[in-house]
Amino acid sequence: MMVYDVAVLGATGIVGQRYVSFLSKHPWFNLVQVAASDRKAGMKYGSAVSWFIEDPMPSDIADLKISRAVPQDFKGIDIVFSALPTEVAKEVEMQFVKNGFSVFSDTSPYRMEPSVPLVIPEVNPTHLELLKVLPSKFGGILVKSPNCTSNVLSLSLKPLIDIVQELKLVNVVSLQAISGAGYTGLYSMSIHDNVIPYIKGEEEKLSTEPRKILGSIDGNEIVQRNLWIEATTTRVPVIDGHTVVVHVLVERDVDLDLVLKAYEEFSGIPQKLNLPMAPKKPIVLRNEYDRPQPRLDRNLEKGMAVSVGRFRLYKTGGVSVIKYVATGHNTIRGASGNTILNAELAVALGFLKK
Ligand code: NAP
């Protein structure tokens, strides 16, 4: 396998540190450049970052000099991973794309643009086909990962959609971790001993992104799935791991055993291709009455598995309500890990030539 030289924008942040940790030991990707804000440009990564994730800071990366996030400072980079703040991502990522770079990003700008793939590799790998035409439109490549909660919801809905096809209504309440707000996102005084019943912009993302992810390709665009999602998003005092409580209304009789079997057996292309970042099981079904729980389940499969459980079925007059709870690691499956897996899939499918 050929080795690709890669860079991370926003490398000192919560998501950026996850990238650094995974990429420092990646078999295909060689992390050679890191960028942060101009305030830190020129400093050594090791002295510029407040390292706070469990894995030790990779010593070779600690010596890298931090770059500015401008394309002219990135020569010979095959893949650019972006964990930039939303406010700067739109302009900066597009500058890289226009300069011919392949950008894999977990930020929100362009996620809903119909010609830009928004991908969870186990759910909609075929959307990467858009990469065949993207360079002629933009100059380079842009692949987006979903919002962290949209990821957990969309992945956890996929086995159900595979067997019942049409969902009438998805009603979801999220319990989102503190790290989802970024390193400087929340005051501890506001979240400690508390639940905050509102996260700006999150309900809009959660009720629209799954429609695109679960949609289909038509020519050079994604057509959204006709899917009604009602969402309430909340912040809870959990460090990592977003949980969603989901009630799905289906206008037909559903067999709960078939649903559970679909979850038990669910697998995707990353598993078939045995990609380095792929979990053995992207969805892990828990049968205990009190699982999944973020603290116990978020690190399963290096944080790449979404755990589901508490399946219940209510039926009345030809209508079924399937109820379940899902938990996934927001900065890994919900960000860096999903995005690295997207890049691996693009390489494996031949969309990224060196
Ligand atoms: P974060 O902890 O606040 O990190 C932000 C990073 O961007 C830092 O490396 C920061 O560098 C850099 N930065 C700040 N201003 C910049 C500028 N003007 N130009 C270039 N770089 C700049 O944020 P995060 O939680 O990692 O989130 C990063 C992105 O991922 C966001 O767009 C977020 O929406 C998305 N996302 C986050 C999660 C999550 O669970 N946290 C999940 C999915 C997606 P300095 O150290 O120099 O300030």
Image (cartoon, rainbow, N blue to C red):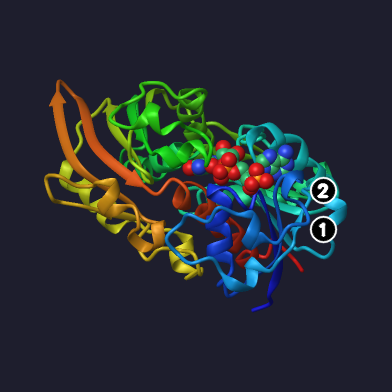
Q: Nearer the viewer, residue 336 or 247?
A: 336
Give the answer, above or below, for where 217 lies relative to 267.
above
Residue found at the very far left of the displayed protein? 289
* Quadrant housing the C terminus: bottom right
* Quadrant housing the N terminus: bottom right
Residue beneath the point at 71% across and 66% down: 64
Mark 1 C-beta closer than 8 Å to ligand 1: no
How many numbered marks are there?
2
Give the answer, above or below, for where 174 lies relative to 134.
above
Which quarter holds ligand 1?
top right
Q: Write down the residue under mark 2.
A: 70
Q: In the visual, does 228 lie left or right of 261?
A: right
Q: Nearer the viewer, residue 275 or 239?
A: 239
Rendered location of residue 12, percent (x, y): 61, 52
Is residue 236 among what the camera can see?
A: yes
Residue beneath the point at 15% across and 20% down: 317
Looking at the rendered structure, the kind of residue marked 2 is Val
Looking at the rendered structure, the kind of residue marked 1 is Phe
Quadrant of res 195:
top left
Rendered location of residue 13, percent (x, y): 58, 48
Quadrant of res 352:
bottom right
Give the answer, above or below, for where 338 lies relative to 214.
below
Judge the density around disc 1: few (<14), some (14-19), many (≥20) Cα neighbours within 10 Å.
many
Rendered location of residue 222, percent (x, y): 61, 37
Q: CB atoms at circles 2 and 1 under 8 Å apart?
A: yes
Q: In the visual, does 310 lie left or right of 120?
A: left
Rendered location of residue 193, percent (x, y): 28, 30
Give the answer, above or below, for where 250 lies relative to 5.
above
- Measured in 3D between alpha carbons, the distance from the residue under mark 2 to the one under mark 1, in whole angstroms, is 7 Å
Q: Write down the residue under mark 1.
A: 74
